[in-house]
Image (cartoon, coloured by chain):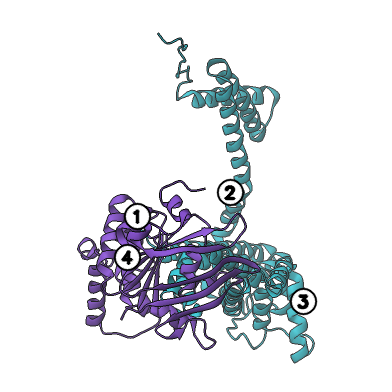
Amino acid sequence: MAKSIDVSDLDIYYGDFLAVEGVSMTIPARSVTALIGPSGCGKSTVLRSLNRMHEVIPGARVEGNIVIDGQDLYGPDVDPVEVRRQIGMVFQRPNPFPTMSIYENVLAGSRLNAKKMKKTLADEIVEKSLRAANLWEEVKERLNKPGSSLSGGQQQRLCIARAIAVEPQVLLMDEPCSSLDPISTSAIEDLIHDLKTSYTIVIVTHNMQQAARVSEDTAFFNLAGAGKPGRLVEMNSTRKIFSNPDEDSTEAYISGRFG
Amino acid sequence: MSAVAHIPLTHPRLPRWAPWLVTAVAGAASALLAMSIGWGVTGWAVAAVLIYTVALPAWSRVVENRRAAKDRLLTTLVWVAFAIALIPLVSLIWKVVEEGAPALSAEFMTYSMRNVVGEGGGIYHAIMGTLVITAAAAVISIPIGVMTAIYLVEYGGRSKTARTITFLVDVMTGIPSIVAGLFAYALFVLFFGEGIRLGIGGAVALSLLMVPVVVRSCEEMLKLVPHDLREASYALGVPKWRTIIKVVLPTSLAGIITGITLALSRVIGETAPLLIIAGSTDSLNLNLFNERMQTLPVFIYYSYTQPGVPPSFGQERAWGAALVLILIVMTLNLLARAIGRYFAPKTGR
């Protein structure tokens, strides 16, 4: 089910503004890859380009190749909607659908696409996804309550359950813990550990300890200077990045001596 | 030892009953004044308010402090402004109920004016005409209005087309209702010739007035839907049109329905366009596409301006119809609130 992703010579523009320049990286399957770097260096932009979500922003466009499973995501015949069905995403702020119950939120991926399914199959998917997201025990008694009745950490796990209910090949996470308290963060990190056996996960985070805890590989992005495009400085195994990085600027950023 | 001076956090306060005491004193003082000079109730009320507005802040200034005095002065002024705003509303409703309530009866609500001279008769034909024409106007303008709003918010962005449409909608908001009526009349004259009177023409004229209101309110409601929700839906591989139908519209449904109902209650009382194109009749007519149709506003207008001989019966019917019209609008508003509450996203807390 999980696939690796090859990114080569990726340039991302917002209108005429070049936001990210010359990114080439290979994201391995069935592992967690963390994208770190200062604010505005383009890591979220790169993440969004992996499932063509940046296209939602007017004027955003991409040059270069992103190949997953031998298919170029930006090929002329590629349907972005199909891409997003294969590559799920979890956002910075929990965003359950306010008009739907917990149960319906988990099934949103199928229900919104008007897929018919038997009640028993639907129940099965809901339980499986909520169990995978470590949320089942907390909500199994109130599946028909609105999704917004949950706490922030529970809502974020509900969003993860919603993303994995459609069984994507890749799961993208854009700072999934930045609005959560340490206990919820820890729950989500445990979840990421469990999920990487079946999914390729890419996570953007500002929390260096989190990157060190959850990821196998880490990519460090930086800006060449104010107003210049962001670029990939270094990508290595997480162990190497946090102990003996190749680049000086990586070490400076990680050890907090960032200038 | 610290050299910081002791700063008191408490200061003297007027007792809680101070405003009531001042009210009583101001009322009594102004009554004395009114009786000695010979003013009526209005003079008494104005004087009482003036005395209160001066007395309470002055007392507060002496006992409390400057800030508390200002607070009391402004609180008084806000309440006075509120009361002044309420006067026309309350007196209007009072007058309509007083004059109209005696007219209400089973006969009044269930009979038309067919072959009625003098006493008796009813407004059944006008009620039905108003409901049918307004419903037709809603059927025409709700799809146009909602879809225009969806285009403007979801697809148009800041494109030239979208900006042009927004501008034209704003211009449409300002169309005088009589012009909408003349437009509908001119339109139907093209097809049916001079002197045409049709219920559907009234519906067209009303929808001309209704569309811009619906577009504007729906646009605001759709803009309120967080962008996060659209992204969440896209990220699940849901196409844009399904996202709009299944996520954006349900989330904003309560606001959209409220906006539509307000637009309806805005046009239901329109007189001028219906006078021109829907005409006036004494009989019940439920066919939008055939002959004249009576409506409540037009009925009120004719019953009051041409009440017949003796005039008292016609005028009483006019007041009764006005009361019924107000009740219909009020019901619409209550319905909108109920529907809005029913469809609002539930928080479950």
Separation of residues labelled 1 and 2 (CA atoms): 78 Å
Badge 3 amino acid: Leu
For marks 3 and 1, give the one nearer the viewer: 1
Q: Which mark is residue A216?
A: 4
Q: x, y percentage for residue B173?
A: 70, 66
Q: Residues within 10 Å of mark 1 (few under 14, many from 20)?
A: few
Q: Chain of mark 3?
A: B
- Residue tagged 1: A243
**Viewer-proximal residue, A107 or A142?**
A107
Q: Which mark is residue B90?
A: 2
For marks 1 and 2, give the one nearer the viewer: 1
Q: x, y percentage for residue A128?
A: 23, 73
As displayed, is residue B189 above or below residue B159?
A: below
Badge 1 amino acid: Ser
**Viewer-proximal residue, A235 or A182?**
A235
For marks 4 and 3, give the one nearer the viewer: 4
| Badges 1 and 4, same chain | yes
Separation of residues labelled 2 and 3 (CA atoms): 34 Å
Residue B320 appears in which quarter of the rendering?
A: bottom right
Q: Chain of mark 1?
A: A
**Viewer-proximal residue, B339 or B111?**
B339
